[in-house]
Amino acid sequence: VKPAMNVAVTGAAGQIGYAALMRIANGELLGKDQPINLKLIEVPQGLKPLKGVMMEIQDGAFPLLNSVVGTADLSEGFGDADVCLLIGARPRGPGMERKDLMSANASIFKDQGKAINKSAKKTAKVLVVGNPANTNALVLSANAPNLDPKHIHAMTRLDQNRALGQMALKLGIGVSDIEKLCIWGNHSSTQYPDITHATAMIDGKKVRLSDVIDSKWYSETFLPTVQKRGAAIITARGASSAASAGNSAIDHVRDLFLGSGSAWQSIAVASDGSYGIPKGLVYSIPCLCPGDGKFTMVKDLKVDEYSKKMMSATAKELVEERDMVRHLL
Ligand code: NAI
């Protein structure tokens, strides 16, 4: 039996936490042969609902689940963590400006960065889901110098999954028939879902998506549908996307640890300056995941004029976000 891995989850009593925890406990995050210890972190007022969630987890009788703790203490929660899923964040309140939201969250991620720096394993892999995810990850990284910035990610996998879903529906094929579709930039409405490198298997033949997709449908229907999917779900469900967000967080971490072969996966991570993206900006880029927590960025892609414009627009937004939290970096 493998030694247990420690998985810390913040915002564990929230709706994404609720949707994801049972699946994590069931082995979908790190593999069906990997025992885990769950460390569930909440703010003090979240501890009561968290207790209920923990009772339900207990009632799941998960063979791979070694232990579960619930805490509002960051050093206890992140202690010896191998994986940190940072879901908890401050939602936008009435009359709250984007700037206020940005700085309220940035200070949460500053504290969590310091705690992870002190208590988690140096090799810990961190995934930020709480919004504004990219900039929260940037703040966290600046406050966790013991961790390699390469291991601090923000989640754009949900955007990739949304894009795949829409494209598969349009073409009447399965999502796994589509390859190399990726998201660039910010997890926000400026994100760039890029199909210029993507292929699809249609009637047993591999074709370039750009050869079969009408450019008007791409720019007038597909792009806005993917970019504004979050808002559309709020309108339909009366609550923000939770199960799909939890699902994508599981996809992200599972592929990182268990590998996903030659598939491209969008990961928002500190830029190394490739593609003219300002160095250090937490920016989504296509990556390959060979497993064991490692990944490599896909380099030297040909970028057409349209993509260049879209990629720099989302970078510009991230630079503006960075400027709003500069005092915490
Ligand atoms: P929720 O409001 O249902 O749950 C959030 C939970 O976090 C609450 O239980 C709250 O008590 C807790 N929390 C707040 N601050 C905390 C802190 N400092 N430490 C620990 N726990 C804390 O929200 P939901 O729906 O679960 O969403 C969580 C976040 O995920 C939001 O910021 C949301 O915008 C973001 N999100 C990101 C997506 C992405 O693709 N990156 C997709 C969907 C949501």
Image (cartoon, rainbow, N blue to C red):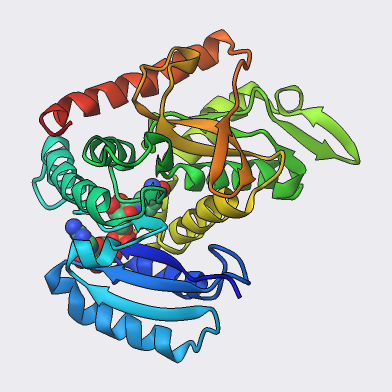
Q: Quadrant of residue 222?
A: top right
Residue plotted at (13% across, 40% down): 103
Q: Is residue 47 above or below residue 142?
A: below
Ligand 1, by image quadrant, is bottom left
Quadrant in which the N terminus appears: bottom right
Quadrant in which the C terminus appears: top left
Q: Is residue 92 above or below residue 329?
A: below
Q: Position of residue 249 (x, y in %)?
A: 47, 55
Q: Position of residue 319 (x, y in %)?
A: 27, 22
Number of marks: 0
Residue plotted at (63% across, 28% down): 195
Q: Name the foreground residue: 162 vs 113.
A: 113
Residue plotted at (30% across, 51% down): 130
Q: Is residue 191 above or below residue 112?
A: above
Residue plotted at (30% across, 26% down): 318
Left/right placement of residue 57 relative to residue 90 reads right
Q: Position of residue 153 (x, y in %)?
A: 40, 42
Q: Is residue 261 above or below residue 181?
A: below
Examine the rendering and report whether any part of residue 218 can be seen: yes
